Image: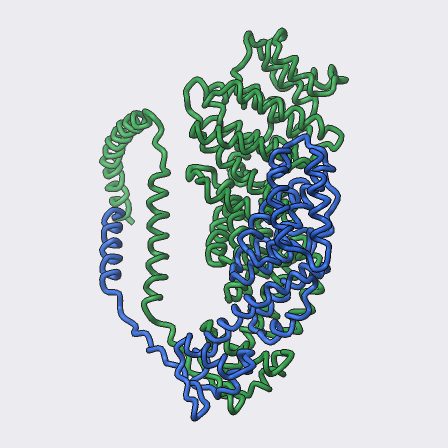
């Protein structure tokens, strides 16, 4: 299933942004990292700067993979005072452990001077730890049910806290909740739950949670092939434009899928292009990259275009797209028999990718391409020959099909019924107002991109003071430099003298 | 479930099964049953209802769907089908599968096809769990494929192969659809066409029928020469959209000004 393949992609999704941060902090143990993250979260809450929370969430995925019971327990120990009730609740979710040695070890090495905290950290930290625990529980089949229970409890908590500074974290929690439901095979049951949460998020203008939940809902509809409902959801909601890139990528992918099913190929194509552009690079999220490209190849074919040959040589895609490449070849040559055999050969793969029905629709495109090729190479051809060349069943069919092709504007030509042949007219030239329209579209895209990037620049508070100081220093240095140059000039003169002497 | 509802239900089944069934009476019974279903809270299933009752409610609605088609009342079929969807989709796990489910789904597909709602057709098709091997679904799927690629004669020939009696009720409107399709193809693909050939292409058996159809489409029929000629549509003139170009260029200039 396409969705299964989406998963590794989603897992990786945010890693793209992580990469640049990684070199800075390779060494800390997971527990130490959680602690420093919680410190950041506290800072975010106290300074009202969601930026810090985002930074914490950005390395969530990398951190997730390194978690274990001991690390989590240690982190909780380190963050909460010993008598805290929250701490007990949290620890309940982890297996009561053969703790002592391991956690002691790490404790001494990682945070030797940490003094025991006096009070509970902010609720955001609690939710963050809960999120980590859910992810951790989801790594093992045995604890799936537990993860589900915890995620239910966590969502209730989020609801009860109702803090805006919690929003970025809760957006991530919803993702974990979905995974928990999915692993427990209860995705359909989670839907009313998501819908209610989405309503709340919209009312609170909580963009990130909204974006996350819209994607959750679309995903769950598409998983069960409920395209009609998914379409209605899309038409009734607006996807917040401030959402993260990865959410946008997913949203566009789902939208592309819906539009493709509805035969709205140009829209589907535009959405898939957006998804490809917004997705992290291929090496980081290969699953998503492949899934989007599979769909986009099919949509491009349905639009009557032939995808680039280079696409199929791309290392990440080459293997995944073998079947699609064969289909492209068949469509390109307009050979109906080759198309049918390829379709049969890769049927199971296409069905798993949920592209089978879309590819089956290509049959008419194969015929159209065939007719177009014939119309280009012959100025007059008998219907009988068309029938033989395209492997059609009867001459009568051929006549209807050619008629339809002419009406649909695939070819320019006439049928002369009395003589039983098709006469092909000249091709239209490729230049006209459409060209300038395409040009305009591209230019406006570039301009938009430029404007967006200007808007996205950040200016930290009071940073200009530092700059002022730096400028001062620079002026100072300049003066010194000028002095040195003057003095150096003398030196040069000396050199010159020396030179003269030689 | 109330006892009078049960009696009505038995009555409905008998009337529906008898050959030929009394459509009028079925209609009356259905109206009464629907009121009964609403009273029992079964028309739109509520949680915690006895599955056995739901099966009966489903059957009543199914009979209603078939009845609408036999009385050629398409909007009514539409309503019944929407009501049935709850039973088919959301209660799939709870209820035993209905033998009439796929015939009705297939009928719905054909309905979409005859109304030329291709996008809806595909959306619906996509949401069906099993496909090609089911004759009730395969039939509309084939029809759609032939329609799309233009093999109209195959559609024409397939009209006798309908898997269920009710499918034939759609044949007439389907033929109307393809005739219009073919006609629009002919208008662009041919300069002129002999009357006799036009009749075969459009599946008309007699000339008067063809002439009436031709007049409706505004074709020039030359009865003595036995030729239909199609009015040429004038080549569209390509005009340069001056204003649009000027506006676009001005906006580029403005944007550039901002950047530099």
**Which chain's colour is blue?**
B
Q: Is residue A101 left or right of residue A46?
A: right
- Residue A420 visible within the image: yes
* Residue under the image location 48 percent in, 29 percent down: A201
Residue B121 rendering spot, x and y as whole percentages = 56, 57
Residue B22 rendering spot, x and y as whole percentages = 66, 55
* Residue under the image location 51 percent in, 73 percent down: B179
- Residue A257 visible within the image: no
Image: A250 above or below A476: below
Image: B246 above or below A446: below
Image: A385 above or below A319: below
Residue A465 rendering spot, x and y as whole percentages = 29, 25
Q: Is residue A311 left or right of residue B137?
A: left
* Residue under the image location 55 percent in, 88 percent down: A382
* Residue under the image location 61 percent in, 53 percent down: B24
Chain A: colour as depicted: green
Q: Nearer the viewer, residue A415 or A58?
A: A415
Q: Nearer the viewer, residue A492 or A441?
A: A441
Residue A350 rendering spot, x and y as whole percentages = 66, 57
Q: Nearer the viewer, residue A292 or A26?
A: A292
Q: Quadrant of residue B229?
A: bottom left
> How many labels sit on residues?
0
Image: A85 above or below A464: above
The scheme the figure's colours follow is by chain
Q: Is residue A17 left or right of residue A71?
A: left
Q: Quadrant of residue A139?
A: top right
């Amino acid at each position: 299933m396409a969705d299964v393949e989406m998963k590794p992609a989603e897992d990786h999704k945010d890693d793209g942004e992580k990469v640049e941060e990684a070199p800075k902090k390779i060494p800390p143990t997971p527990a130490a990292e959680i602690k420093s993250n919680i410190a950041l979260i506290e800072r975010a809450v106290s300074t009202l700067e969601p930026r810090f929370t985002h930074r914490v969430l950005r390395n969530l995925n990398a951190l997730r993979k390194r978690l274990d019971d001991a690390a989590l327990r240690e982190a909780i120990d380190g963050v909460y005072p010993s008598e805290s009730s929250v701490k007990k609740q949290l620890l309940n979710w982890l297996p009561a452990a053969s703790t002592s040695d391991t956690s002691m070890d790490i404790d001494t090495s990682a945070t030797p001077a940490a003094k025991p905290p006096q009070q509970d950290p902010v609720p955001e930290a609690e939710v963050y730890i809960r999120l980590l625990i859910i992810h951790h529980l989801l790594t093992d089949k045995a604890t799936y049910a537990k993860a589900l229970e915890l995620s239910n409890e966590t969502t209730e908590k989020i609801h009860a806290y109702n803090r805006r500074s919690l929003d970025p974290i809760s957006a991530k929690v919803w993702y974990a909740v979905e995974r928990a439901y999915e692993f427990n095979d209860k995705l359909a049951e989670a839907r009313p739950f998501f819908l209610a949460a989405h309503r709340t998020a919209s009312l609170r203008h909580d963009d990130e949670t909204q974006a996350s939940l819209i994607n959750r809902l679309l995903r769950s509809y598409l998983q069960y092939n409920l395209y009609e409902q998914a379409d209605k959801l899309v038409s009734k909601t607006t996807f917040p434009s401030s959402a993260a890139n990865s959410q946008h990528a997913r949203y566009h992918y789902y939208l592309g899928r819906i539009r493709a099913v509805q035969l709205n190929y140009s829209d589907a194509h535009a959405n898939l292009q957006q998804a490809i552009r917004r997705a992290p690079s291929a090496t980081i999220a290969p699953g998503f990259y492949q899934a989007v490209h599979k769909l986009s190849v099919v949509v491009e074919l349905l639009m009557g275009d032939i995808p680039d040959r280079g696409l199929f040589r791309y290392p990440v895609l080459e293997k995944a797209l073998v079947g699609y490449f064969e289909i492209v070849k068949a469509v390109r040559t307009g050979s109906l028999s080759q198309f049918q055999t390829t379709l049969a050969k890769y049927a199971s793969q296409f069905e798993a990718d949920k592209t089978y029905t879309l590819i089956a629709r290509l049959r008419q495109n194969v015929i159209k391409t065939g007719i177009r090729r014939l119309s280009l190479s012959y100025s007059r051809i008998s219907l009988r020959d068309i029938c033989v060349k395209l492997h059609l069943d009867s001459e009568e069919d051929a006549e209807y099909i050619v008629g339809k092709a002419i009406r649909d504007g695939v070819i320019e030509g006439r049928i002369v019924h009395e003589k039983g042949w098709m006469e092909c007219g000249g091709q239209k030239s490729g230049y006209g107002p459409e060209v300038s329209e395409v040009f305009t579209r591209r230019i406006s895209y570039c301009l938009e991109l430029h404007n967006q990037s200007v808007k996205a620049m950040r200016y930290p508070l009071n940073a200009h003071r530092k700059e002022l100081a730096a400028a001062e220093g620079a002026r100072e240095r300049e003066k010194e430099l000028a002095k040195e140059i003057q003095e150096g000039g003398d030196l040069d003169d000396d050199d010159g003298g020396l030179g003269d002497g030689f | 479930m109330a006892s009078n509802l049960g009696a009505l239900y038995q009555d409905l089944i008998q009337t529906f099964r008898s050959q030929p069934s009394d459509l009028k009476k079925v209609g009356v019974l259905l109206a009464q049953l629907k009121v009964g279903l609403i009273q029992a809270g079964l028309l739109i299933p509520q949680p915690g209802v006895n599955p056995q009752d739901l099966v009966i409610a489903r059957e009543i609605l199914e009979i209603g769907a078939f009845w609408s088609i036999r009385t050629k009342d398409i909007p009514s079929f539409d309503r019944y089908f929407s009501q049935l969807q709850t039973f088919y989709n959301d209660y799939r796990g709870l209820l035993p599968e209905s033998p009439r489910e796929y015939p009705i789904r297939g009928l719905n597909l054909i309905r979409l096809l005859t109304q030329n709602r291709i996008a809806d057709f595909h959306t619906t098709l996509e949401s069906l769990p099993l496909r090609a091997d089911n004759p009730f679904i395969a039939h509309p799927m084939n029809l759609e494929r032939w329609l799309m690629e233009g093999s109209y004669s195959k559609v024409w020939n397939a009209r006798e192969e309908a898997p269920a009696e009710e499918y034939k009720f759609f044949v007439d409107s389907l033929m109307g659809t393809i005739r219009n399709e073919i006609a629009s193809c002919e208008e662009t693909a041919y300069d002129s066409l002999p009357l006799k050939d036009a009749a075969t292409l459009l599946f008309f058996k007699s000339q008067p029928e063809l002439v009436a159809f031709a007049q409706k489409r505004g074709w020039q029929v030359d009865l003595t020469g036995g030729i239909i000629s199609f009015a040429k549509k004038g080549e569209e003139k390509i005009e340069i959209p001056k204003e649009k170009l000027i506006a676009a260029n001005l906006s580029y200039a403005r944007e550039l000004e901002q950047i530099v």
